[in-house]
């Protein structure tokens, strides 16, 4: 159950951040609608979804700030947002795994079920 929870946590982060970083564009919506990765039965609680939403809001603010500060400091073609690289960095850093494992441990010790 823990592995499923962690995977869902990371996948939900990825989808939410992707939507935010591309302004919930029609193209992103179509890609997400066609993908059926990992989503079967609900595993995350409403508190988890709110937590992930706050993480993605915070990270999107960082992404926008980094993008704005790069203008005029990098090659013209490299200016702007780099959401895919940002997401890959987050996933490879194991930061999300650590957060998800911590939240799962807290849920495991709490009286309510997933």
Image (cartoon, rainbow, N blue to C red):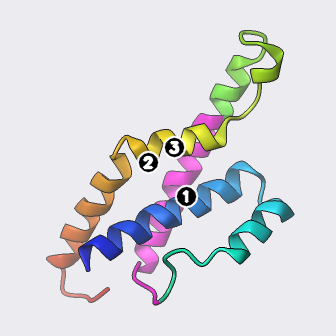
Q: Quadrant of residue 85?
A: top right
Q: Residue at x 27, y 89 (%)?
A: 113
Q: Is residue 38 left or right of residue 77?
A: left
Q: Which residue is mark 3?
A: 88
Horizontal and vertical percent position of residue 53: 54, 61
Helix, strand or loop status at disc 2 = helix
Real-space CA distance between mark 1 and mark 3, rounded to the nearest whole angstrom: 9 Å
**For the magenta stretch, what is the residue range?**
41-63
- From the viewer's perspective, is the residue at label 1 or at label 3 nearer? 3
Horizontal and vertical percent position of residue 24: 77, 60
Q: Main secondary structure of the magenta part?
A: helix
Q: Residue at x 32, y 85 (%)?
A: 114
Of residues 103 and 47, the one nearer the viewer is 103
Q: Is residue 79 above or below residue 107?
A: above
Between disc 1 and disc 2, whose residue precedes?
1
Asked whether residue 38 is drawn in magenta, I would say no
- Check residue 14 in the rendering and tell me which mark sits there, or answer none: 1
Real-space CA distance between mark 1 and mark 2, rounded to the nearest whole angstrom: 9 Å
Q: Which residue is mark 2?
A: 91
- Check residue 80 in the rendering and tell me which mark sits there, or answer none: none
Query: What is the crowding at mark 1: few (fewer than 14 residues within 10 Å), some, or many (at least 20)?
Result: some
Decide: marks 3, 2 in contact (CB < 8 A)? yes
Decide: marks 1, 2 in contact (CB < 8 A)? yes
Q: Is residue 112 left or right of residue 62?
A: left
Q: Residue at x 49, y 87 (%)?
A: 40
Of residues 16 and 34, the one nearer the viewer is 34
Helix, strand or loop status at disc 3 = helix
């Amino acid at each position: 159950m823990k592995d499923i929870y962690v995977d869902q946590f990371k996948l939900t982060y990825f989808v939410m951040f992707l939507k935010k970083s591309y302004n919930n564009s029609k193209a992103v919506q179509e890609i997400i609608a066609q993908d059926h990765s990992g989503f079967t039965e609900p595993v995350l609680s409403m508190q988890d979804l709110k937590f992930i939403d706050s993480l993605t809001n915070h990270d999107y603010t960082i992404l926008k700030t980094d993008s704005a500060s790069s203008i005029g400091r990098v090659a013209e073609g490299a200016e702007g947002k780099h959401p895919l690289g940002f997401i890959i960095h987050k996933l490879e850093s194991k930061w999300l795994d650590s957060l998800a494992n911590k939240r799962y441990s807290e849920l495991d010790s709490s009286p309510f079920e997933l």
